[in-house]
Image: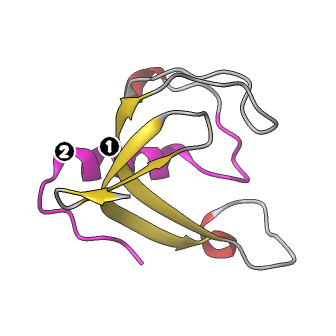
Amino acid sequence: MARAGLTYGKEEAGIDIAVKRLIAIHDCNKRYKGMYPYGITTVFFLCEPVSGSFTENDETIASEYFTLDDLPKLSEDKGSKEQVEVRFEAFHDLDWQAEF
């Protein structure tokens, strides 16, 4: 669904979101510690929660927001603190250019 220049959808945890802009597209085998025998591409979008509430599912058992200084332990084969730091930069930079 699109309205007023935004795309609306539902993310994995059950929250209805508005996609504001593309942040990055990453080749996982070049970015993460865990190497996969197949190709995985991760696409990062800056989204804004619109409505809904967290729903436990096969992929996610809890939902919480964190500051950059209070991140939980991350699964290093799926992401890194450095990647999260860049996402925070993208959030604060209105002129952010998507990474490829």
Give yes or no for contact between labels 1 and 2 (Cβ–Cβ under 8 Å): yes
Decide which of 9, 65 is in the foreground and name it. Answer: 9
Q: Which residue is mark 1?
A: 88
Q: Is residue 91 magenta?
A: yes
Seen in the picture, residue 83 relative to 65 is either above or below; the reply is: below
Decide which of 68, 56 is in the foreground and name it. Answer: 56
Q: Quadrant of residue 30?
A: bottom right
Residue plotted at (35% across, 62% down)? 23
Task: Give the magenta part as a residue range.
Answer: 74-100
Decide which of 9, 28 is in the foreground and name it. Answer: 9
Q: Is 50 positioned to the left or the right of 81 in the image? A: left
Q: Which residue is mark 2?
A: 92
Residue plotted at (74% across, 79% down)? 39
The disc labelled 2 sits on which kind of residue?
His
The disc labelled 1 sits on which kind of residue?
Phe
**Quarter of the picture holding the N terminus:** bottom left
**Quarter of the picture holding the C terminus:** bottom left
